[in-house]
Image: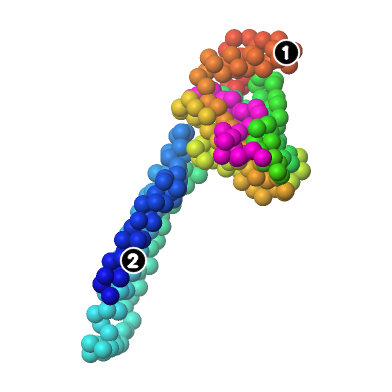
Amino acid sequence: MFKSLTQRLLAALALCLVAAPALAEWGLNLPVGVTPLSKEIYGLHQLIFIVCCVIAVLVFGAMIYSIATFRKSKGAVAEHFHHSTKLEILWTVIPIAILVAMAIPAAKTLVKIEDSRAPDVTIKVTAYQWKWRYDYQDAGVGFFSSLAADSVRARQLNSGIDPFSVDHYLRNVDKPVVVPVGKKVRLLLTANDVIHAWWVPEIGMKRDAIPGYINELWFQIEEPGTYRGQCAELCGRDHGFMPIVVIAKPEAEYESWVGEQRAAAGLPPLPEHSLAAAGAK
């Protein structure tokens, strides 16, 4: 019996070791993110999680101890409880205090999430089946952003292309969103047909894009880089093929990019520092 049990444990351990590479990217927690809001949301999540774990350990620990220690087979006799005003006040006040203590930091974070005032850059985002349209309100440029051509080819039936050979398969676009690092970016979200949702995990924000309605979302990316997301609302047949790519660049590079986009559209260059002034206005 012991030999069989040992063999089973060794086999289970071997399977875990074999599966370890597959689980390397498997995360159970929220990403910390690259914006002040995403980091604050992560910290709030951790705080609430720890509080819930402590409560669970205390409550279930007391229950298990009571069940194991004071059971009938050990001669325990049921106790007859009587009314106690002090106890009732105590088990009412303690949960209220815990909820208030959790509600205060949560309310502060919610207020910050909704405070989209005084942005440096404003981008109108319109969702379509199945692509995104980005219009830079301050820079006067706009474009559609669709699934990258190599992913489009690979996803076709009988294409003969191995999806694993495609860089960022189904997570790349032909035209990414470009934003400046360290600046407050406000998105005005709407949709042309059905409900969609704009979501980039590392930015820490998700907001629905609803036809005939404008939703607001803001973020301030602190680190240059490329951040990927996707539509997070089931919007039809090709819902899984409308990714989001955000590239954060230093301000000088961002203004250079805006100049290139305006030149490509046949528009004159913007006056120096006009982006910051327009955003402040």
Give the quarter of the image for residue 74: bottom left
Amino acid identity at mark 1: Leu
Nearer the N terminus, badge 2 or badge 1? Answer: 2
Give the residue at mark 1.
267
Whether 176 is drawn above or below 94: the answer is above
Evaluate whether residue 216 shows in this view: no
Residue under the point 30% across and 69% down:
5
Q: Position of residue 143 (x, y in %)?
A: 70, 26
Quadrant holding the C terminus:
top right
Quadrant holding the N terminus:
bottom left
Residue under the point 72% across and 48% down:
237
Whether 211 is drawn above or below 76: the answer is above
Pick the residue in front: 5 or 29.
5
Give the quarter of the image for residue 145: top right
Residue under the point 65% across and 32% down:
150
Give the residue at mark 2.
8
Q: Is residue 125 magenta?
A: no
Q: Is residue 169 magenta?
A: yes
Q: Position of residue 99 (x, y in %)?
A: 41, 57
Evaluate whether residue 161 shows in this view: yes
The magenta-colored residue range is 160-187
Please identify the dominant SS of the magenta region. Answer: loop
Which label belongs to residue 91?
none
Whether 180 is drawn above or below 200: the answer is above
